[in-house]
Image (spheres, rainbow, N blue to C red):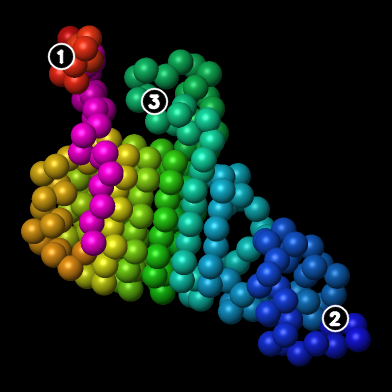
Amino acid sequence: MHITQLNRECLLHLFSFLDKNSRKNLAKTCHKLLEVFQDPLLWSLLNFHSPVELKKDNFLLGPALKHLSICWYSERVKVCNIEDWMKNSFQKDFCKRHENTVSDFLLDVCNRCPNLLSLTLSGCGHVTDHCILQLLKSCPNLKSLKLENCVQITDHTLEAVTLHGASLRTLHVDFCRNVTQAGLERVREKCPSVMLRAERSANMIPDSKPGKKLMLEKGSRKLVQL
């Protein structure tokens, strides 16, 4: 039996075991398999491991998307996490090449994936509070929001959760250095049904304000303004 003789349900099951590149390559072989590739039922879950993957054409975004994960585990993440005023010209050039990639992708998700249930972001150093706010507004059924090592996330995201996260049941803001204890307590107060986790976040050294430089006193965690 040839693969194209299988019914639609079997082909979808077969495609579900393949990664995005394999799905795309198989879809190029004939029109019937291309139709399977374009079936929204195939794209309820998407996992990405670097910003570069977001620019490929080996996946589809649509209302069927329920679970999205963008986790970048790389030494390059450390460069993105450096405060802008501390970056050298090489580091600034590196960040400029992809600084809007994840945010632009998430805004596209806002417009095309209103049924999203869970979002996990790790190492996405250029994602802002505004982006998360728009996503919470556009995806009212979002139940799980997990943010890890997203350095531009602040208490504004936590405030957005209290205002627009009516369906949210799980919130992680791990290693997000610009989240404060006051912001976390506000979420606990206003959203008691949310399972909140903030590993290390409120205990990390936050970014300095523009125009000010901070130093860590030797042998302590005390910040001194210069």
Please, what is the three-letter code of the amino acid marked with disc 1?
Answer: Val
| Dominant SS in magenta | loop
The crowding category of the residue bearing disc 2, from other C-alpha atoms within 10 Å (few below 14, some 14 to 19, many at least 20), is few
Dot 2 falls on a residue whose secondary structure is helix
Count neighbours of disc 3 (C-alpha within 10 A) and say few if under 14, some if 14 to 19, many if 20 or more: some
- The answer to whether residue 135 is visible is yes
Residue 112 percent across, percent down from the top left: 47, 68
Left or right: 74 with respect to 9? left
Residue at horizontal 25%, vertical 47%? 198
Give the secondary structure at mark 3. loop
Q: Which residue is mark 2?
A: 3
- x and y, in percent, of residue 140 in the image: 31, 71
Q: CA distance from mark 1 to mark 2?
A: 67 Å
Quadrant in which the N terminus is drawn: bottom right
Residue bearing the label numbered 1: 224
Residues 33 and 211: in front is 33
Res. 30 image quadrant: bottom right
- Is residue 34 placed above or below 195 in the rendered structure? below
Image quadrant occupied by the C terminus: top left
Q: Is residue 134 something that shows in the picture?
A: no
